[in-house]
Amino acid sequence: MIGRSALLGLTLLASACAAEAGPERPSEPVVDEADIISPAAEQALDKKLRRYWDEKETAIVIATMPELKNESIEIIAKRMYNQWGIGSAKTQRGVLVLIAPAERQARIEVGCGLETVVTNDAARQILDDDLLPRFAAGDFDGGTAQAVAALMTRIETAKVTPGPVSPFCVEIMKEAA
């Protein structure tokens, strides 16, 4: 028989694990939990991102969160990316754009298959030049659309072969092959 304190402990542990896990894996490429993207813009992004996956086998997912709950956006983005398994397991060509409007933060998390194309510097530039200025002006639809367009342009016009750079990603890509 489980005592009251043990049951309470299990309940608290389950709650903590659920909170850490984040949202369930999405079935669509736009997950607007912060409700900042208009329905029309969300529908247009959904269509564009699905077509991009079909044509290029590269997944771009947009996710918004109402708040970060005192956790760093980098940790949340990495965890969401890995839990959701964005992109193909074989090619690792996936991108997560995570937006936390309450904290005025955004992060682009890139899969191993695109490390050479969407570098940390390139991701920061897309946020600084395309997403954040529009968000600062209150244009969430335009900022999100502009960031997606910039990511697609970056991926399509890259002068380097897409692939891994970090030792961690090189190992993951070897295992996937």
Image: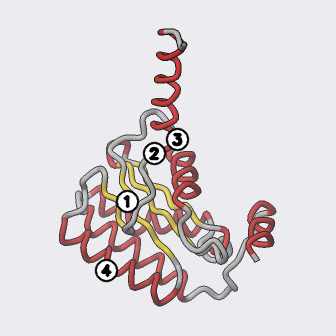
Residue pushed farthest front? 1
Which quarter of the rendered picture does the C terminus lie within? bottom right
**Residue drawn at 19 percent across, 64 percent down:** 38
Q: Earlier in the sequence, mark 4 or mark 3?
A: 4
Judged from the image, the secondary structure of the residue bearing numbered disc 4 is helix
Q: Amino acid at mark 4?
A: Lys
What's the mark number on residue 5?
A: none
Q: Earlier in the sequence, mark 2 or mark 3?
A: 2
Q: Amino acid at mark 3?
A: Ser
Q: Where is mark 3, residue-wise?
A: 72
Q: Earlier in the sequence, mark 4 or mark 1?
A: 4
Q: Earlier in the sequence, mark 1 or mark 3?
A: 3
What's the mark number on residue 22?
A: 2
Q: Residues within 10 Å of mark 3 (few under 14, many from 20)?
A: few
Q: Where is mark 4, residue-wise?
A: 47
Q: How far is the residue under mark 2 from the one under mark 3?
A: 13 Å
Displayed quadrant of residue 164: bottom right
Where residue 142 appears, as percent x and y from the top left, is: 27, 70
